[in-house]
Amino acid sequence: LHTLVENAVRHGIDPSEAGGTIEVGAQRAAGGGVRLWVADGGRGIDETHASGTGLANLRQRLQATFGAAVALELHALQPQGVRAEIMLPAP
């Protein structure tokens, strides 16, 4: 989650002149897995840029630890912001 919070601050909140909020949460998912998230109310996703090194490294670490069943997704929030979600499989 540390990488996702850093990204929310650096790419979402810092560039926004209005500032914003960051929410960190967790929830048991259907089937016994866990959904973790970091959401920010910053400037949102820039569709013209690919995921950076931090997210690529995080995906690799998650897959090395939890296997192919883990997922990391980014979702645009309305009216602005991003929600990054990690879905961990059931043990």
Image (cartoon, rainbow, N blue to C red):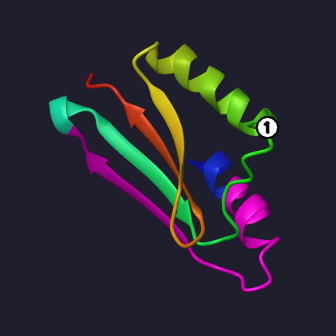
Q: Residue at x 26, y 25 (%)?
A: 90
* Mark 1 surroundings: few (<14), some (14-19) or many (≥20) residues within 10 A: few
Relative horizontal placement of residue 51, taking residue 24 as reference (left or right): right
Q: Residue at x 46, y 29 (%)?
A: 71
In this view, 47 is above or below 88: below
Residue 25 within the segment the image draws in magenta: yes
Residue 68 within the segment the image draws in magenta: no
* Position of residue 61 measured from the top left corner of the image (x, y, whole percent): 62, 24
Residue placed most toward the observer, 57 or 17 = 17
- Residue reaching furthest to the left: 31
How many marks overall?
1
Q: What amino acid does circle 1 point to? A: Gly
Q: Residue at x 80, y 42 (%)?
A: 49
* Position of residue 59 measured from the top left corner of the image (x, y, whole percent): 61, 27
* Position of residue 91 measured from the top left corner of the image (x, y, whole percent): 27, 22
Relative horizontal placement of residue 66, taking residue 79 as reference (left or right): left
Rendered image quadrant of residue 48 = top right
Which range is magenta?
6-29
Rendered image quadrant of residue 20 = bottom right
SS label for mark 1:
loop
Q: Which residue is mark 1?
A: 52
* Position of residue 29 measured from the top left corner of the image (x, y, whole percent): 24, 40
Q: Residue at x 52, y 38 (%)?
A: 73
- Residue reaching furthest to the bottom: 18
Relative horizontal placement of residue 79, taking residue 16 as reference (left or right): left
